[in-house]
Amino acid sequence: MTMMKELSLYKIRDLALESGRSVYNSAQLSNLINMERTTASVYMSRLVDKGMAKKLIRGKISFVDDDFVIASQLVEPSYISLTSALLFHNATQQIPRYVQSVTTRNSMTYPEVGLEYHKVNPGLMFGYERHSISGSYCFVATIEKALIDGFYLNVFSKDQVMELCDFNKLRDLIPQLEKFSGKGSKKLMRMIS
């Protein structure tokens, strides 16, 4: 009987990893394994107990131990930005206390997994790319978009933005920034003009 449980846990882990997604809640795992949500929750606990998955926060597990993958998939929609994105692109040596992401959802910090999310207007959800990493994926802002996000959120000064950005790439973002009319739009347009 134990052998059967072990095999099914390996199969679940393999199915998850083959899907490309690494972070799951019970509903997502339920869909993946085509079982009831309560059954998926039991499997999640067993996977964590056996060391085949990592418990993140209540009701969410990860099959990989990569902070950027976890940050991108734990809260959706979101992408890694600010100093974390600059570090990802080797544009800074500074290591932030938490992996920093932006989202359209409310700002939140998960110190137990070292992640923080900053709320931005939905009109600013652009300027990021999907990267394959650790057998999965993460979304990371371009250097210029990370700087714009940081200026918008009062993390970076205009001088810091101007010092680190590639002006041609910054200009490429102007059409999307011009469409943005939410709070802080005038501040952003003044900075790039």
Image (spheres, grey):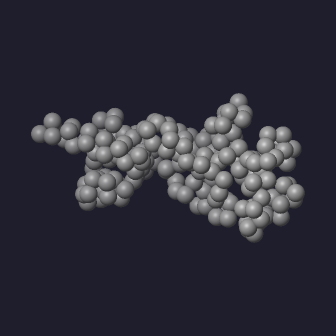
Q: Position of residue 164 (x, y in %)?
A: 79, 40
Kindly give the residue lying farthest to the left in the view shown.
1
Residue placed farthest to the bottom in the image? 181
In the image, residue 138 sits, relative to residue 76, either above or below, namely: above
176 or 16, nearer to the observer: 176
Residue 112 visible in this rendered orientation of the protein: no
In terms of depth relative to the viewer, which is nearer, 109 or 152? 152
What residue is shown at x 77% (from left), y 65% (from top)?
178
* Depicted 134 relative to depicted 128: above or below: above
Residue 117 as seen in the image, left or right of residue 40: right
Residue 14, image x, y percentages: 31, 41
Does the rendering let one see residue 148?
Answer: yes
Q: In the visual, does 18 lie left or right of 186?
A: left
What percent of the width, then of the height, locates residue 38?
28, 57
Q: Quadrant of the C terminus?
A: bottom right
Whether 30 is drawn above or below 113: the answer is below
Q: Position of residue 101 (x, y in %)?
A: 62, 49
User: In screen coordinates, is 173 left or right of 100?
Assistant: right
- Determine which quarter of the picture holds residue 78: bottom right
- Count of marks placed on residues: 0
Residue at image point 30% right, 35% down:
50
Taking the spot 79% from the left edge, 48% from the top edge, the residue there is 168
Residue found at x 64% / y 64%: 122
Left or right, 138 with reference to 156: left
Quadrant where the N terminus sits is top left
